[in-house]
Image (cartoon, grey):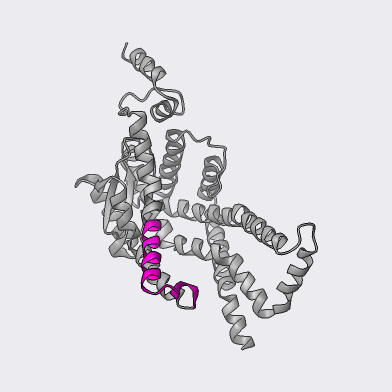
Amino acid sequence: MLRRAAETKLALEPNVERAAHVSAAGEAVLDAPLCSRGEYLVLHLRHYLGVLLLPLLGMLAVQDVARLVAPDILDGPYAVAVYLPPLVIVFAAFPSLLRRTWETSPLETGALRDRLEEASARFGFRVKEILVWRTGDMIVNAAVAGFLPGLRYVFLSDALLRKLDSDEIEAVFGHEVGHVKHRHLMLRMLAMLIPLCLWFLIQTACPEATGRMETMLAGGAFGGQTPTRLAILCGLGLYVLVVFGAYSRVLETQADLFGCDAASSHNDARHFEVFISALEKLAAANGIDRNQSGWQHASVAQRVDFLRRTLVDPSRGSRFYRRVRMLNQMVVAIVLSPLACWLLIG
């Protein structure tokens, strides 16, 4: 009777609400709180738009003040001096902004918190606070934000805490720690700079090459600089979708391997099985097809297959780490190449 009543109620809800309260297997989630369409909209506006809007408004305010005090300052070489300090401040304070924009509260004292703090100490991972990210049980996810330990927060959504057991939560926590320990945020930022750095390298090493390319493209049907701009936009889009996406998937796999070592009290097989279970549950809870790949994430099936193969053959993990280390070194080398070229030529 209770099951039938729940199904009847779900049938009357909007599609977005039904998606939030029906599992991947089609089962009604009876213990999940229901929310109205308005609450759903406010939640997502606050969680996504608010995070982007506040820093943008702050930068626009800095720009307006600069133009009011010194109208021509943004048109000269001192523009960097105007924008750089607030950008650094926004970047450093972003985790605190995130904590206040999202609805969060510290993870309560207890066995789970003690366990995660022990894992942090074991990995040498300093975090200011472990927070419960309150989403009305609509988001099953975890995140870490902050370069500086004093401004670093780990976010665990309420739905994740409800759907996963302690072992699995610790494994997911270990995955997020892995991103920080392997400096993935910095590496992703450097990878995004690669097209610009390669352009600077070409201009430094062969200044006439860019002029020749512009002249060649300008001979097209559009004329002027339009073909050059289109070529640059298409090249950037292709790089972000293909190269950056593939690199991000490699880093996610590295974080997966780190997450498998989150629970030191278990043997190696148990490590992997716990993390695999967490991956499968997260995919099911978020309604994700386990065989579907994302832009920055391989499919759950591919990630599970890699972990199982690594469990059978540990040398596979060692080889993977060596390849990732070489790949990261190549990213850093490319980003530094314009400076190295300028020093050699100069």
Q: Is residue 218 left or right of residue 65?
A: right
Magenta stretch in the rendered image = 55-76
Q: Is residue 157 left or right of residue 246?
A: left
Count the labels in the image.
0
Report if residue 230 lies within the magenta region: no
Nearest the eye: 250 or 319: 250
Where does residue 113 sit, x and y in percent of width and height? 24, 48
Residue 214, image quadrant: bottom right
Q: Is residue 130 above or below residue 36?
A: below
Q: Residue furthest bottom?
A: 346
Q: Residue at x 76, y 61 (%)?
A: 223
Q: Is residue 345 left or right of residue 5?
A: right
- Main SS type for the magenta part? helix
Q: Is residue 122 above or below residue 22?
A: below
Nearest the eye: 23 or 14: 14
Nearest the eye: 259 or 2: 2
Where does residue 148 sit, x and y in percent of width and height? 33, 65
Q: Residue at x 40, y 30 (%)?
A: 20
Query: In which quadrant of the rendered image does the C terminus lie?
Result: bottom right
Where does residue 43 sit, x and y in percent of width and height? 35, 39
Q: Residue at x 57, y 37 (%)?
A: 291
Q: Residue furthest top?
A: 1
Query: In which quadrant of the rendered image does the N terminus lie?
Result: top left
Where does residue 153 sit, x and y in percent of width and height? 31, 55
Q: Is residue 134 left or right of residue 13?
A: left
Q: Is residue 313 visible?
A: yes
Q: Is residue 261 visible?
A: no
Q: Is residue 292 above or below residue 34?
A: below
